[in-house]
Image (tube, rainbow, N blue to C red):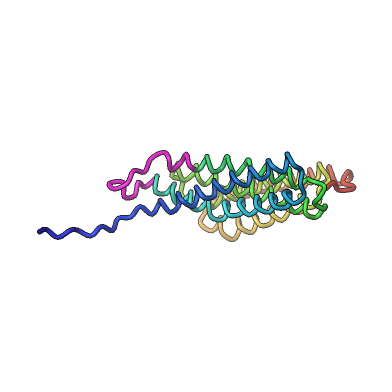
Amino acid sequence: GDEGQSYNQYNEDLIQMRNVWLLIYSAIFASCLSMLFFKRRSNFIAVGALAMNSLVLLAFVTGGLFDLATLRTSYIHQSLVEYYHRGLTYILLRYLAVVVMIALLWFNHKISRHQLFNVQLRKSTQLYFHFIVLLLLSSEMVHWLELAKVENSFRLSLSILWGCYGLFLVVLGLSRDLKHVRVGGIVLFAFTLVKLFAYDMSDMSTILKTIVMVTLGALLLTASFIYNKYKSSTGNETP
């Protein structure tokens, strides 16, 4: 009889889909635990919910977003499309996961304000909140730039986003007397400057470098103006 042909075309995207679905189910379970806390107001449930929510969010931004990026790449390039269908599900799954994670982030923020937790933990949770938001925004920007087939989307565009978010944190910290948020914004802004000069501008044209420097100067002037405006009014911090 005829010998069978070996089959070596595997749909490795199924692994990424499995990972994302596991994170979605974990987030749903953590959300249910958070809602149970709002009903029972138990200290034990509060600690468990805060810890689980934080772990699921961290797993999503450190692993889930990379799995979703792999699925996006498969959708764009239609790899092995003769064997497997690369449909809109690859994109829609991303937004199902993001919506679930945003809800979980909101639950985490509310639980951290419980009187059980001290001021230092509340401050850490606030910084963690902005860390997760920044990574979600960064991932979303790269996602749409990749769909638009913009090359090196992770370079200048991310620096602009991080610079603006750093400025936002400085303004937020000044307006609400939150020193840790203000310092976090300054650190993010400084890191963005290092990334901009050490990496982003290495291959830019002269015109683009000029535009970047003007934009950067405008952000620095804005930050300086806002800081001087609120400097006299920054007194006691609120947790």
What segment is highlighted magenta in the picture?
A: 76-93
In percent of the image, x 60 and y 52: which residue is there? Answer: 56
In percent of the image, x 11 and y 58: which residue is there? Answer: 2
Q: Is residue 83 magenta?
A: yes
Q: Estimate the x, y position of residue 38 in percent, counting from the top left.
A: 73, 40
Q: Estimate the x, y position of residue 80 in percent, counting from the top left.
A: 31, 50
In percent of the image, x 54 and y 43: which residue is there? Answer: 97
Pick the front one: 173 or 198? 173
Q: Main secondary structure of the magenta part?
A: loop
**Residue most extreme to the left:** 1
In percent of the image, x 63 and y 43: which residue is there? Answer: 31
**Total residue callouts:** 0
Pick the front one: 72 or 118? 118
Pick the front one: 235 or 4? 4
- Judge whether residue 100 can be spotted in this image: yes
Q: Estimate the x, y position of residue 99 in percent, counting from the top left.
A: 57, 39
- Judge whether residue 211 can be spotted in this image: no
Reply above or below: 197 against 142: below
Q: Is residue 49 left or right of residue 4?
A: right
Q: Is residue 104 magenta?
A: no
Q: Is residue 175 left or right of residue 95?
A: right
Q: Quadrant of the N terminus?
A: bottom left
Q: Is residue 81 left or right of residue 195?
A: left
Q: Estimate the x, y position of residue 238 in percent, counting from the top left.
A: 85, 46
